[in-house]
Image (cartoon, grey):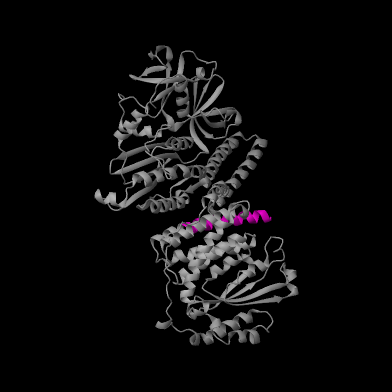
Amino acid sequence: MYEDLKNEFISEVKDLLDNTEKNLLNLEQDITNKKYVEEIFRSMHTIKGAAGIYGYNRTVELAHSFENLFALIRDDKISINNHIISLALKAVDVILSLVTSKSEELIPHNITQELMDELNEITSSAKQETHGKTNDIPPHRLNTYYILFEPDADIEKRGIKINTILSDFDDFEHKIITKLTDPDRSNKNKLPEFYEIIVASHYSAEDLKAIFLFTPNEVEISQIADFNLFADDKFIDFYEKAVKILPFSQERLELLKNYAHKVKNKIIQEPSESKKETVTKPKNKGKKLLIGLDEINQVIDETKQRYLQYIKVPAKKLDLLLSLVSELIINNSQLAESAQKKDFEHILQLSESIAKTINEIKETTLHLRLIEIKTILPPYYRLVRDLSLKLGKKVDFIVEGTDTHIDKTIIDKLSSPVMHILRNALDHGIETPEERRKKGKRETGIIRFIAYYSNTNVIIQIQDDGRGIDPEQVRKVAIEKGFITPDAKLSKKEIYDILFMPGFSMAKEVTDISGRGVGMDAIKKAILDLRGDIEIDSEIDLGTSVTIKLPLTLSIIETLHVSSGNLHFLIPLSNIIRCDNIDISKVQKHSGQRIVIEDQIIPYIDIAEYFGLKSQSINEKNLILINGGRQPFALFFDKIHGEYQAVIKNLGPIFNNLDIFIGASILGNGSVAYIIDTYKLQKSFFKQTNINQNF
């Protein structure tokens, strides 16, 4: 039970940190927007309260320092600058590492201490200049709340400590906490002890609820005044003598509200000119933030995937799925009854109805796995922001199509390739402001992240308006390094494809950010592993566009069911150009596994020969023309059975060294069919036969 709650807490903190990072980046672009400051403050307050319950003491301390800073920003005591944003973003990273690591002790103490020192230094400086105590805040800037906290009898068993919750009020300057007792409450599954809390605060009621994050049904919060009731010098005396002595009832709350109403006009006064708050502008001392922060990056990378395993699903989708399952159960009962009566006509009708319901369940289940592209964007915003500052470049990061959905498995594996492409665009694509001015461009460069649907695929384009890639320079480097011969005639697309060749790089020196070409082969492999494709287009001084084509889902795939010998295979329909039945004895052949089809010489692979199978037909073959990238190629099979919607299953470890299969699927008759990765089959076959295919 405790571990389940703890995992829920960690997942919740991950979401809060994602939102905080997004709000910090938005705040940097619009420093006057109080909404972002409020949300950042509220998130830190929630994290602080919840972390204390589960014993994350260093997280509590860091979140508290973070919260204090943004409390002063919210109250216009401190003005925002890039240094504060950078500091806050680093704090987000450190809190993530503290919460997701197996133990806070795995994170070096100097990392958290150094960060807290910087946060507290800014906060202390502001307080010294503004005498930043709650007493100095005009009464009309605070609200007064009445909180009734009635813990359930099993609260301790749930791993929640009452004292930890109450300790969250230690920092409130104006508060009254009264412990009450009622033995009769034990009969209502409540502890006999409960608490009455009166507090004046900047916080909204929602903020205060965050203190009771894991006891939401055990607390009631009511606003009794829209000003600081403690500013009335007789209020505490009134509470002690007129309220506290009463038996507990709703009458206590009503008394407090009535008192607030009577003293309101006397208490609320607009601040005079002489009492206007001073705004502190923290100086950016230019010192390096968090020496040794890289020590925690590995912890973050290793643990964050554990919390990406959760998908937030709208309730209406689950309701639809439940409705479909109910319908399936009813149909199954009717089918059993019809089978007993041997009502074959009704059985046929039910079979069609069940097939339709199963298809709807499949579609609904697939959509449960689809999540919006925008869920992966925060790290990209952060990357563009951090690297542009580091490189001294001005960049606008523009995103389009954030509501495009894609399979979660693809989302999880897409992050690294996209990060590398963005680094290349920032490091090698976008010019410095001076260079852009000389070219007559805006000082601020543009990087666009565009996502949209194309048939059953999702297209992602990453564009920059920078230097572009010179195809002649790529060709020159490729010749110098022996990737192509000097007399090779290549199209512009073929030249840019060289960038994806293993070992090819145009970087003159290695940097800690990127190198045009370094790792591009790994990017292409990652995209191909997702059954996708990637290509580059560029114009000198206009910019570069990298286009990634991905399937919507990896779970189910539309295929063509074929067989050779005694084995069944499935070929993705998206890779097929056309099918034909031919007499191979009458086809014109050329050396090197090539045949002539419609006046075009193309390579071919006879699957029976390739796998050493006994073909059921010697001359009559079924030809399937495959889109092979630069050049199509043909596959020969004994039989074509028809289209098949395949549910992809992973192959066992025995197939680890045979990557020409995407996976396998179970056919209707129980046979196993292997799903062919046509690109890898093509590459493997022609590598074995030493045929130069330029694909």
The outermost residue toward the top is 585
Quadrant the C terminus occupies: top left
Q: Position of residue 37 (x, y in %)?
A: 46, 65
The structure residue drawn at horizontal position 42% and vertical position 75%, both measured from the top left corner, is: 278
Instruction: Tell me if residue 300 comes above or below residue 263 in the rendering.
Output: above
Camera-nearest residue between 337 and 83: 83
Q: Is residue 227 visible?
A: no
Q: Position of residue 129 (x, y in %)?
A: 46, 75
Q: Is residue 26 left or right of residue 667?
A: left
Q: Position of residue 292 (x, y in %)?
A: 52, 52
The structure residue drawn at horizontal position 62% and vertical position 86%, both measured from the top left corner, is: 237
Q: Quadrant of residue 35?
A: bottom left
Residue 110 inside the magenta-drawn segment: no
Residue 10 inside the magenta-drawn segment: yes
Camera-nearest residue between 523 and 207: 523
Q: Is residue 512 left or right of residue 65?
A: left
Camera-nearest residue between 501 and 660: 501
Instruction: Tell me if residue 289 comes above or below residue 234 in the rendering.
Output: above
Which residues, given as a range, are shown in magenta? 1-21
Q: Is residue 391 visible?
A: yes
Camera-nearest residue between 419 and 119: 119
Instruction: Tell me if residue 535 comes above or below residue 187 in the rendering.
Output: above
Q: Quadrant of residue 221?
A: bottom right
